[in-house]
Amino acid sequence: MTVNDIPLVAFFKQLLDPLIILGTLYGFTLLYGEPFNGYYLILALLAYFISSNVYERLDLYRTWRSGKVLGYIRDILFGWLIVVAMLVFIAYAADLSSQYLDEMIYIWFASVPVILIIAHLAIRKIASDLHKNGEVRSVVIIGANDIGVRLVNRINDDPYLFMEVKGLFDDRDVMRHPKGMRNVPLLGSMSDIAPYVRANNTQIIFISLPMSAQPRIRQLFEELQDTTASIYFVPDIYIFDLVQARFDDVAGVPVVAICETPFTGFNSLIKRTSDIILASLILLILSPIMLAISLIVKLTSRGPVIFKQRRYGLNGEEIIVYKFRSMTVMEDGDKVVQAQKRDQRLTPVGGFLRKNSLDELPQFINVLQGQMSIVGPRPHAIAHNEQYRKLIRGYMLRHKVKPGITGWAQVNGLRGETESLDKMEARVEYDLDYLRHWSLAFDFWIIVRTVLVVFKKDNAY
């Protein structure tokens, strides 16, 4: 039994969407007399996996909870449009389009969002009726602090948890409680908790005391042993700058991850597979252009066609990154000067290559080698890493993932020269935001944004 184990909520979050996506596709194959083979199963699984990531990124279910029906319908239609675009791309990239009946797939594409909307609105009505009929669990919170405020707000914002916060317990005066919790009644001090829970048959207790209060927490557990309440400890890990925080275990010992790469387990396989497929396709398509660039670089300036520079890769290990040479210098030492506007070190074609990001094309080879990803924090010269790791808090955390050819910072205007510390700090913050919120849909969105940014040709010299 977990805090979210309300049958309706569990069904909605875990079963409804995949049943609709898989069920409608299976139904249409029966209607059209098509065998539901492995290709259709893969299509359904891909659709569900991509849609769950897209809708998570759009924060669809918060829109659903907030009661904004039109916003919810807009988000589900826009999200499904992204899903369809990705499925079409994957089908053509993997040469699978011939395995499907076009007319049936088009109807399936059009039907799924309509059925999702109808089903979700029906669930909304059922949930609303249950809530009005008092089908909620009573909740009390022990400890009035910032974490408690966060928890109260989340419960109040999500009626589909079927929880009602009755109040809080704290030894401090109510006027010392954090702003935002003063509309929650103070039910008593710590000594009043057990009698209140027994008298009111409270179902859930959240303890939001700091970890330093371990003796008091242990005492609370002992006092609450003769109640039937479910007890949850809310650790104050939010005092840390969390990156992919989650609960895990090591040989059966529970641990809390507060700083981890998003690419573990199945996510690692998904990321690597998408990198290999996309990089292979791009190299195949752009190989004539890359050959022409190689010839032009060789004929217009002295030096090698490919510039190799040491960078930090995954976990801060050194890698060699490839670029078409765009400068007359080959800086890779303790001091590396970033390219600037009208830089005199640029070759005759160097400015054009850099402005259009064509100098980065050989890095798709780095992707196939497993040293880089298509999307990730841009790798900096080692000299810059050593400089900024001393100046910017959390700078090295960006190396918890493989560096990328493009990244979240670059599509948000932080491309090219970072002539001030503020710009580099902003770039690092976007990189860390990418680590916190990674999804396959997020990667595709960044790739689309990258194409638009390259056409604008801003900030790259």
Image (cartoon, rainbow, N blue to C red):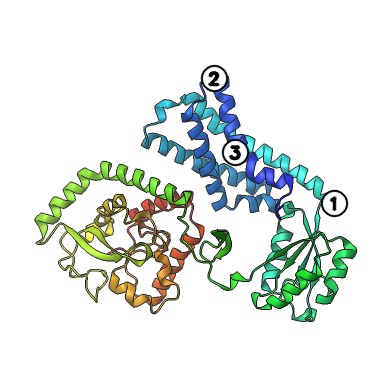
**At which x and y percent is residue 396?**
40, 70
Dot 2: what SS?
loop
* Sequence-wise first label, 3 or 2: 3
The quarter of the picture where the C terminus appears is bottom left
**At which x and y percent is residue 304?**
13, 59
* Residue 121 to residue 182: above or below: above
Judge left or right: residue 231 versus residue 342: right
Residue 438's disc is none
**Where does label 1 land, which residue?**
134
* Sequence-wise first label, 1 or 2: 2
Residue 32's disc is 2
- Which quadrant of the figure has residue 358? bottom left
Residue 18's disc is 3
Alpha carbon separation for disc pair 3 and 2: 21 Å
Check disc 3: other Cα within 10 Å, few if <14, some if 14-19, many if 20+: some
Dot 1: what SS?
loop
Q: Nearer the viewer, residue 67 or 443?
A: 443
Amino acid type, callout 1 = Gly
**At which x and y percent is residue 313?**
33, 63
Q: Mark 3 and 1 residues: CB-CB less than 8 Å, in contact? A: no
Q: Residue visible at 52% across and 61% down?
A: 244
Residue at the extreme front of the image, as rendered: 251
Q: Nearer the viewer, residue 363 or 89?
A: 363
Check disc 2: other Cα within 10 Å, few if <14, some if 14-19, many if 20+: few
Residue at the extreme top of the image, as rendered: 33
Check disc 1: other Cα within 10 Å, few if <14, some if 14-19, many if 20+: few
Judge left or right: residue 22 versus residue 64: left
Q: Residue visible at 41% across and 58% down?
A: 411
Judge left or right: residue 2 versus residue 367: right
